[in-house]
Structure formats: C-alpha cells, structure tokens
Amino acid sequence: MYNDIVMDHFQHPRNGGEITDADAVVEVGSPECGDTTKIYLTIRDNRIEDVKFQTLGCAAAIASSSMATEMIKGKTLEEAWKLTNRQVSDALGGLPEKKLHCSVLAEGAIREAINQYRKNMGLEPWTE
Ligand SMILES: [Zn+2]
C-alpha cells in the first residue's frame, strides 16, 4: 500500500519529539481516521529554527508529519505557510488516494502553529 519513502519516514520519523520552550505548540486532529498531530515550532528572525512533532495515527499521517517538518525547517514563515499537503505527498513519492486526507493534517498543524505565533506576537493571523 505504501512506497519505500513513506515506509522509511513512518519507521524512522525525522523531527519526532517535543520542544519544551517552543514558540508555538498546536494539536490538530483529523476526524476521518482519528489521527492527531502536535507540532512544536521554535522561531528566530522569522525563520523556523526548529520543529518537532508528535503524531498519533496511521503511517500516512506520521510519514507526512515527518516529511513536512523536514520541508519547513530553516524556512521563513511565509515559505512554510505555502507548504501544501500535495507537495508533502509528492515529496513522499505519492500517497494512496484514500490516505491523502491524512497529509492535510500536517499542513493544517503547521499553519495553525504559525498563526499561534503571530497571535503571540500581536500580529493578525494569516488566512488563505
Ligand atoms: Zn490517517
């Protein structure tokens, strides 16, 4: 069902864990298959200096979180905001169609975390 890249990120997730003094922490859930993702961001000079995640869920959700965090690390908030679940899925070499919704979780969590940070800084949250 899953390709080798997905299986590799599922079995050896990058950036798994937590950041105790993170600048933003959010948890989002997907009702479709019960996945939940918690994202921690450390932000310096408008860049994502560090990112960690804890995902409870299926292989697609865990692999997507792992790949998505790899893709936003070191990026500006503007760049990270533009990351889509389609880009994450492509970077993973493709997810099964019925599992695509699981990759939306990482995209949503990253955006919520960015907006939480903006709120903390007294800035307007971004919308689409
Ligand atoms: Zn899932």
Image (cartoon, helix red, strand yellow):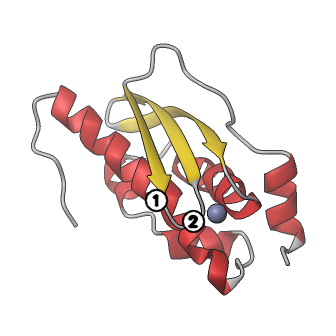
Q: Which amino acid, by three-letter code, is at mark 2?
A: Ser
Q: Is residue 16 visible?
A: yes
Front one among 100 and 23? 100
Mark 1 Cβ inside 8 Å of ligand 1? no
Q: Position of residue 43 (x, y in %)?
A: 39, 30
Residue situated furthest bottom in the rendering: 97
Front one among 52 and 74? 52
Q: Position of residue 62 (x, y in %)?
A: 69, 52
Q: Residue at x 87, y 57 (%)?
A: 8
Q: Which mark is residue 107?
A: 1
Q: Are the residues flagged by discs 2 and 1 in contact, CB closer than 8 Å?
A: yes
Instruction: Check disc 2 and report the residue beneath it.
Output: 103
Residue 26, image quadrant: top left
Asked if 25 appears above or below 74 in the picture, the reply is: above
Q: Which amino acid, by three-letter code, is at mark 1?
A: Glu
Residue 56, image quadrant: top right
Residue density around tag 1, few if under 14, some if 14–19, many if 20 or more, within 10 Å: many
Q: Residue at x 59, y 38 (%)?
A: 53
Q: Position of residue 66 (x, y in %)?
A: 67, 50
Task: Name the quarter where the N terminus is drawn.
Answer: bottom right
Q: Ligand 1 is in which quadrant of the figure?
A: bottom right
Task: Name the quarter where the C terminus is drawn.
Answer: bottom left
Residue 115 horizontal side relative to residue 4, left or right: left
Q: Residue at x 28, y 33 (%)?
A: 117
